Every structure is written in structure tokens, then in C-alpha cells.
Image (tube, rainbow, N blue to C red):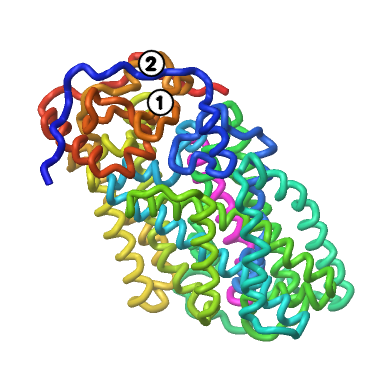
Amino acid sequence: MTAPRPDVSAPVPLDVSFTDDPRVVKEAANEDYSTHIVPLTWRSGRLSLTMAWYALVSGMFYLVTAATLAVTVGTVDTLIGILLAVAVFGTVNYVFSRYAARTGLTVALLSQRVFGYIGSVLAPLVLAATAIYYAVFEGSVIAHALHAYTGALSIEFWYAVSILTNVPMAVGGVRRWLDKFNGALLPLYWTGLIIAVILAAREYKPSGWFTHTPDLVPDLGAPGWLYAFFVYMGVFVFMMYTVDFGRFGKPKDAGFHSVVTFGPVFYFFVYFVNGLIGIFLVLAAGAAGMPTETAIGDTIVALMGVWGLGVVWLTQSRINTANYYVASTNVEAVVARLFHIRVPRVAALAVASVVTYLIMLTDVLSYVLTALAWQGAFVVAWVGIMLTHLALHRDGDRDGLPEFRPGRVATFAPGAVVWMISSLTGILVLEFTGTFGTTWSSPVTLVLSVGLYWLATRTTRSPVLRRAHDPRDEVDDIWQARVRCHRCDHSYIAAEMDRDPSAEGAPAICADCAGRSRTFRRAALAEAATLSGGPVSGPRLREPTPQR
């Protein structure tokens, strides 16, 4: 098919306004600007965003992981590894949360600059798959606890119950529901765990749990404390979660969020405090052998009865609101890019829940950790590439933003090649180098992704396309001006708008419509080819920075 002839003549004037489009605001109540930049008017209050994010502070995964490490390498080495993880996660997410608040971009949109128009589709796909696997894990804990306590009906029935009671809580957006739900239940979560600890201390009268060391430490290829830290590197997906939640932060609150909400304070609670409780509950109970995925939940139910069942449900439901939210927004992004259709986030949430149930019907606990390890290689590589990109492009491409608009990035960027090479190398190291791979695959992947991306940026052309007529040059403030999209007839902030050379007069088009339109993409590429030897829109002399 012949590409539409690019229109580089004077375009039609923009249809500009300076208040939110009421139709967009109505959609945002559930959609949360899943495929758009989050405007300043939709940013969350400080406490609101903190409570929405702190859904992730509760999860049996953290307790079981710490307990498993303590049984493997000893309590002290485990806690040293956890504190190192708190420092590293806190520092990296300090950077990512501030960047997300400054740009308002999702993982999917941000990845377009680094991996290209097509190459970037892997980012939301990996994030959606990882979020679904975590939802499977946490939902399975609920189902097994209910099944064991009641002794009735099949486990498949309780899988369905766990999903049907969790998914509706993820329908609302971050600032309309998740903040209120998780804020109300956060005190109950900590209260339940504290009661469980007190009952365990009375029941088992533990001693020596804090100084526990295994009788025989296996050959791990690294000191115990370093091995424990490397295990936590497999949960680098938190960095991607941070971007998708951090985009709702107000720039003026970036200091608070980078330390308390997404930074070291959060990780102190999620890893150290939760880990300490998990280690205590398992070692105090004197459980023989390696803890199972459901060991902590079983212990809590045994100690507290029906109230313990409530604590398990509460714990897992809180974290699953975040898992299902992230899964749904990224499923929406994947469907839009691969099939060029728009699906409501509620429909994407339904798809995620069905996939979750189907995975649960398999022998999930036998392979979910392996699947997460493979996905973890892609996540670790993504983090390494993004950190390198942020270090090399601190001021963005223009206006303090990375160029993410679908009509202004190459189809494949060098970052996509780097991502695949470093991720697949990490998986090969994991699978074929024995003990060394089990311990060192994540750091090898991280170092390789950083080094290769740095080299790629120094030896290849920028993936940013040269295009004519940028709507950002036609307004005074790209964060305050709203521009109407000629395709969906909705108005979005000028920061995400582009000109559509496939339409007469090159009217404006929003990021979502641009990403789903084949005709727009072909025309944009044709225009870029025509102008490849000409000037590209340069940085603005003044760069409006969001202040609210």
C-alpha cells in the first residue's frame, strides 16, 4: 500500500482550550489516562498517592521470601541482604519516581523513546505478565487458606472466589478508589500481623530465631548476604510499578514521594519489617524443611482461626488491587499497539482476571517462580537500560520530556536490540551455568544492559524522527493548553499532541489515536523520510515545567 503523501504545508490552526475536557475527565475516573500523559489537574494528593501505593506493602510473597532465605543462609545474612536491597531499591526508585512525576508517562509511553514504536510493545507485555503472575501467587494463597480452613468444595472453586473478590476492587482508578480502599485497610494489615507475632511468641516460645544459621549452607557461589540481595533483584519489577504509579505525583511533592512513598521508607517496611515478621513466624513455629509458598498463611490461620483467615484475605487483597491495576493498564496498552483498537480498562481487567484463573488451574506453584525468574531477566535489563538513558538524557529530548509520541520515534530503536541481547543472555546464564547462574544471572544482566546501551547510544543514530509542525511550538505552555484531537474529538494537553500528516491540513492527533492508527504512522514515516536532511524542531528557549 502506498503511504499517504506527507503534508508539510502550513497546517490548520489548533483548537486550543485551557480547561479539562469534561468527557476526558469522566473517562479518567476509570481509565486514569492509561494511554495518555497524566495532566497536572489529575495528579493525586500526597497522602492519596501514598495510600494507593502502599497497597504493595502487604503480601505473603515478602514474608515467604525472607523466611526461605533465612532457612537457606541464616537470619543475619538474610537481614544484611534485605538492608542492602532497601538501600538499592530506595535509591533507584528515588530516581524513577521523580522522573515519573516530571513526565507523567506510563512504562508503555516512556519505553517508546528507548525501544521504538514497535520495540516498546514488549515493555507493557512483560509488565502485564509479571503483574498477572504476582496476582496468581497472591490469589493462590487466599484460595489455599480458604480451602484448608473450610475443607469444603474444590480448590478451583476457591481460586474463582479469590479472583471475584479481588478484581472488582481494582476497577476504580488510583485517585478515585485505590487510595481510599488501601488507606482504610493499612492499619488492619499491620494490626493483624502484630497479633499473629504475639500469638506465635506465646504459642511456640521461640529462642535463637534471630541468630539462626542452617546446619549446612549450600554452595551458592556467593556469600550468604550477597546471595540474599541478588534474590531481591528478581523483584526489580517494582521499578516499573513505580513509573506507572509515580506519574500521578505532583511535581511539588516529588521530594516526599521519592523518599517516603516510593523510596527507602517504603522498602524498609516492605522488605525489612515484613521480612523480619516472616522469619519469626516460620522459625518460631519450628517448621521443618524449606517453607512452602503458603506456609505463612497457614501459620497465621492456625494461630488466629477465622480471624487469621481474614488477615490473609486482607493482606492478599490489598496487594492484588495494585497487581490487577497494573496488569489491566498494560494489557490495554498491548492491545492498542498490537491490534490497533481501544479497549476500556475494565475490559482489560476482565481479560487479566480470566488469564489469572486459567494459570491458577495449572500446577502453578511448581513453575511460577521459574516464570518470574525469566520475566525478571527482562525487567532487570529494562531497569539497567532506563537508568542509563536517564543518566545520558537528563533533560529529555525537548521540553524536559523524552520524545515518546508515536509519530516521532523510529520503528525499532537500538535499545530494543540491547534489551533482547541482555535479557536472553541473563536467561541463558540462569539456565545453563548451574549455581553460578542461579546466583549471578541478575547482576550479569544488569551490567550487560547498562554497558550495551551506553555503547549503542554512542555509536547509533537517535531514534527521534525529524518531523514538521510540532503543536508544542504553537502554544505558550504545553502543560496548560488542551488541544482537540481530530480523530477522537477529545482534548488533551499539548505535551502529547502531534500533527497528523495523513489528514488534510494536518490537524492535531492525541498520543492514543496516533498509536493505534496505521495511516498516521505511515504518513509520519513518509514525512520524516522527506525531511530527514532538513532541520528538526529544536528545544524550546523556555521549557515550561509543571509546578502544581
Above or below for 60 versus 333: below
Q: Earlier in the sequence, mark 2 or mark 1?
A: 2
**Of the pair 349 and 189, the residue shown nearer to us:** 349
Residue that carries the numbered disc 2 in the rendered image: 475
Q: Residue at x 14, y 40 (%)?
A: 3
**Of the pair 449 and 180, the residue shown nearer to us:** 180
Q: Which residues are magenta?
A: 71-99
Residue that carries the numbered disc 1 in the rendered image: 484
Residue type at mark 1 is Arg
Percent of width and height locating residue 478: 42, 21
Above or below for 85 versus 360: above
Q: Residue at x 49, y 50 (%)?
A: 329
Marks 2/1 in contact by CB < 8 Å: the verdict is no
Name the quadrant containing residue 10.
top left
Instruction: Give the side of residue 240 with respect to residue 323, left or right.
Output: left
Locate the C terminus by quadrant: top right
The answer to whether residue 254 is visible is: no
Q: CA distance from mark 2 to mark 1?
A: 13 Å
Name the quadrant containing residue 462.
top left
Percent of width and height locating residue 333: 41, 49
Instruction: Say what secondary structure mark 1 lies in.
Output: strand
Magenta segment's dominant SS is: helix
Q: Residue at x 68, y 57 (%)?
A: 318
Instruction: Say what secondary structure mark 2 lies in.
Output: loop
Name the quadrant containing residue 279.
bottom right
